Amino acid sequence: MTVKLKFDRVTKRFGKGRLVADDISLEVDTGEFFVILGPSGEGKSTLLRMVAGIEPVDAGRIFIDGQDATHLAPNRRNIAMVFQNYALYPNMNVYKNIAFPLKMQYFPSEEIEPKVRDVARTLGITEILDRRVNQISGGQQQRVALARAIVRNPTLFLLDEPLSNLDARVRFAARAELKKIQKDLGQTFLFVTHDQKEAEVLSDRTGVIHLGRFEQVGPFSDLYERPATRWIGDFVGDVPMNYMPWTEAGAGGQLGFRPEWAEVTDTGTETATVQVSERVGDFSYLLCTMANGWRIYLRTLRSFAAGSEVHFTVNRHVFFETPPEDAATAPSGRPERLPPRPPAA
Amino acid sequence: MSSPPPNPDRSAGSALAEPTAPSLPSEDGATGGPTPVAGDTATPPVYHARRFTLSNVGLYGAIAVISLFFLFPIYLIFLIGFTPEEYTLFSGRPPILPPQLTWSNLQAGLSATNAPFLPSMYLSLEVAFFVGALAIVIGIPTAYGLSRLGSRLAYSLTTVLFVVNMLPSITIAIPISVQFIEVGLYGSPISIGLTQELLALPVTVFLLVGAFQGLPRDLENQARVDGAGRLHAIYGNLVPLIRPALAAAFLLAWMLSWDESTFALILYNPASSATLPVNIFLAFTGRGNPVVGVAFSCIATIPVIILTVFLQKYLKGEDLAAGVRG
Ligand SMILES: Nc1ncnc2c1ncn2[C@@H]1O[C@H](COP(=O)(O)OP(=O)(O)O)[C@@H](O)[C@H]1O
Ligand SMILES: [Mg+2]
């Protein structure tokens, strides 16, 4: 595995604002589909733009293919980028949009034509090559932007929320197609999203960015199964994690568990009071309060009325040790500052 | 309830398990009463033909009054231009409609020996196109640079550019003339054009800064990532998108020069010819030959009309407007 892209202690802030990138180091392997996941405004796009060279780096270095690219002009980096709004050139038709990167590399026009037609066929946009870019649908615009990125065979693709402007139905198909394209090309994709579903489906590895740092980097299943911090536990997953005070190996902290990691039985070791019960399909989802006032979610096949007691056993958990200086201010209930959660994909 | 319940398949990682948003049974169900279905009895919408209502009359009336207000002076010029002098300039009560039409005023004006028409027209055109073209050539890079500074700084700097426009022309025209005499360009089209550019450029830059700022920033970034150098990104990708603003800026600069008389008069070298406005001015004042002035005025409107019609399709920019997103 060779390293395709490397951030070496990259730091960035806008004006006197907070650090958007705070001493970030990261390596992305060749051929990897790496997703940068995080809530809006956490600096995901900025990170991508620094790789593209359209946003200067304050400190630290960025290496592409082992070469220091920190100060390289964008047109010398041999990368492709798909912007969130696709940034199609409005004064050119679809064909010319796709041909543009080839023209910039001074390909003779008899070589450009077959390349454009080839990539258009792959993406199923052959019929719209003559259209103006404002005469095609959002899904088609996304394909054109992708075609323009692919056409000159770059080895590093940067994609900034390319699916977020699509209707739910189109987005679903586009997501699956994107994964296939990346596999077929075998090239490195750096993909930014606030949508954890996209990270889950697309990524080889996901890095969750928070307060200018990668809070956790790893396969998406690790983020869900073994969140490194409570923030990750709350951010990843459809609902925030459940927590109970806990002591493990002499250290105080909290035990975190997902609803499906707990089993509701009459012989359960823990007790909670049902506040709200919702029936979805076979399952009841119970929003409960523990004796100490903390709120948790449970999942069960049985029905419970609001106000009744429920017993459960936690079969799997992760342990978050409370740092000693935090112990005094350990949360007394369900954390008030839940991360803003993205809408479902 | 602040969060939806968890999705049972969450950990299974299935791409197909899109979370649905379940909800508690709605209150309607409990009441059990039949709810009328909206739209059942709705009649199809009726489309009214556009009526000539009272408010429309007022609107068209106002438009007519305003148009008259602006067009009347032009009408007067043509009236004097094509009516025998005895009914207009030498009459105590000039008519509103021409009692008789004639070409003789125009002929007299165009053949006047102390103000040869053709060289004057040529000089005016030369200077106006020079001013218009230079405004675009300098305006594009200046406006691009300003538009990338952030709007507040750009606005302040553009305001500073207008300083020359705020001063009375005469106060700067004289020192400038002295300079041009020293370099031997006094009275040349270049000297007149460069001086008029002082007035035209701020307007042009102001217009173009707005146009550049209106473009999505990522279009330029996209072009750069796609392999274009900075100059190509500006002139190949951005400039074609602000064609309407360029056409407007060119037209404004051109017309500003076409009209301008103070600089043109002070830089007028009697050894060569004067621009049209200067000749019109001199015809009414120094030479006391109003007919020549009126004839020149009539003809001076023609290039303006031609140019406006020609640039019309660029001014609209219909082909572009819808394509610029973000
Ligand atoms: N050009 C800029 N000037 C000033 N602040 C900026 C600029 N671009 C982004 N920011 C700020 O930096 C932070 C990160 O932005 P961004 O990278 O776009 O976040 P994300 O893509 O994760 O939503 C935001 O708070 C945003 O307001
Ligand atoms: Mg973003």
Image (spheres, grey):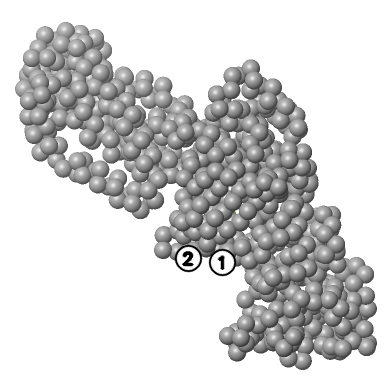
Left or right: residue A308 versus residue B196 is right
What's the chain of the residue with tag 2? A
Between B305 and A202, the one lying in front of the other is A202
Which residue in the structure is indicated by mark 1?
Answer: A211
Going by the numbered disc 2, the residue's amino acid type is Arg
Asked if the beta carbon under badge 2 is closer than 8 A to the nearest atom of ligand 1, the reply is yes
Which residue position holds label 2? A18
Mark 2 to mark 1: distance in Å?
9 Å
The image position of residue B128, as x and y in percent, is 26, 23
The residue at 49%/63% (across/down) is A19
In this view of the protein, can residue A303 be seen by the observer?
Answer: yes
The secondary element bearing badge 2 is classed as: loop
In percent of the image, x 22 and y 35: which residue is there?
A: B198
Q: Are marks 2 and 1 in contact (CB under 8 Å)?
A: yes
| In the foreground, B275 or A47 | A47
Quadrant containing the C terminus of chain A is bottom right
Q: Could you say which quadrant of the image residue B129 lies in? A: top left
Of the numbered discs 2 and 1, the one sitting upstream in the chain is: 2
At 84% from the left and 89% from the top, the residue drawn is A271
Query: Percent x, y for residue A313?
Result: 87, 83
**Secondary structure under badge 1?**
loop
